[in-house]
Image: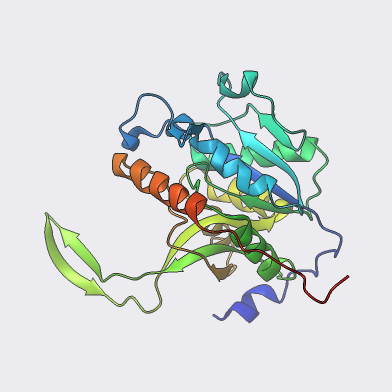
Amino acid sequence: MGATSMTKHLPKPPSAARFWALIPSAGTGSRAGVDGPKQYQPLLGQPLVMHTLAAFLATPRIEKIAVVLAPQDGFFATLALPPSVLRAHCGGATRAASVLNGLNFLRTQGASVHDWVLVHDAARCLITPAQINALMDACADDAVGGLLAHKLPDTLKCEAHGRVTGTLERSDKWLAQTPQMFRLGDLLKALALAGDQVTDESSALEALGLSPKLVPGNAQNFKVTYPEDFALAEAVLRARLAAPKTVQTNKGKP
């Protein structure tokens, strides 16, 4: 079934919808091999999650940013955060539960069911304002919403007992990234029906028979998951800091 037939029944959303960001940050990062939650590990002298927040704070169209924390998480208690960053101590046992709780929290902060919510992994600390804006531009008038994703660059193998059992066609395969941007009301409904087993928001919308839009992302927007990822993320951040800034001379303009 094509995307058109899957979206034609959805009502046209109001044009004045706002953009909110939701960053689940209640996980422990057990695969990262570090002492404590990986999102609080230092990268270039700052906790990893602060690099993530910086990208959203540099995106003016974002109304508010809610960081979903474990109920007893005191990490942000002593940090001076901008008023646009909200602490939501409602993290659940799974990512899906944290996102669902976070959406309900946004409702208490004035978010409408018609507003857009950009859900982003705290551990994807290399996201940029340009990528966030690209997603918003691509999906703001879409009936469903969408996600950043990266075309699969490698050959994909199936495995059993440590041996290859087949090779999959990769031309139509994408690696899902975040942010993933959907209407708050649609996300509430989809996650409530999908339960705790979905690993991203797109999966929940797909379970309703909808086809989220794929917006090309970037290979650098990876999720810090394993011990070696910290060094790679830090190398990318260092390279960005060292890159020459574009100078706009505005010649010929007043």
Give residue 154's position: percent from left, percent from top. Answer: 29, 69
Q: Quadrant of the C terminus?
A: bottom right
The quarter of the picture where residue 180 lies is bottom right
The image quadrant that residue 140 belongs to is bottom right
- Nearest the viewer among 143 and 209 is 143
Q: Residue 213: image x %, image y %?
A: 59, 70
Q: How many marks?
A: 0
**Where is 177 relative to 65, above or below?**
below
What residue appears at the point 32 percent right and 42 percent down from the top-left corner?
A: 226
Query: Of 49 and 181, which appears nearest the observer?
Result: 49
Residue sitting nearer the eye, 15 or 192: 15
The image shows residue 115 at horizontal and vertical percentages of: 77, 54
The figure's colour scheme reads rainbow
**Figure check: 78 above or below 233:** above
| Position in image of residue 74 (x %, y %) | 57, 19
Q: Is residue 40 above or below residue 213?
A: above
Examine the rendering and report whether any part of residue 145 can be seen: no
Residue at (54, 59) in percent of width and height:
244
Q: Quadrant of residue 159?
A: bottom left
Camera-side residue of 81 and 20: 81
Direction from residue 184 to residue 225 in the image, left or right: left
Q: Is residue 48 above or below residue 59?
A: above
The residue drawn where x is 77% and y is 33% is: 83
Q: Is residue 32 visible?
A: yes
User: Quarter of the image containing the N terminus?
Assistant: bottom right
Residue at 50%, 32% in the rendered image: 47
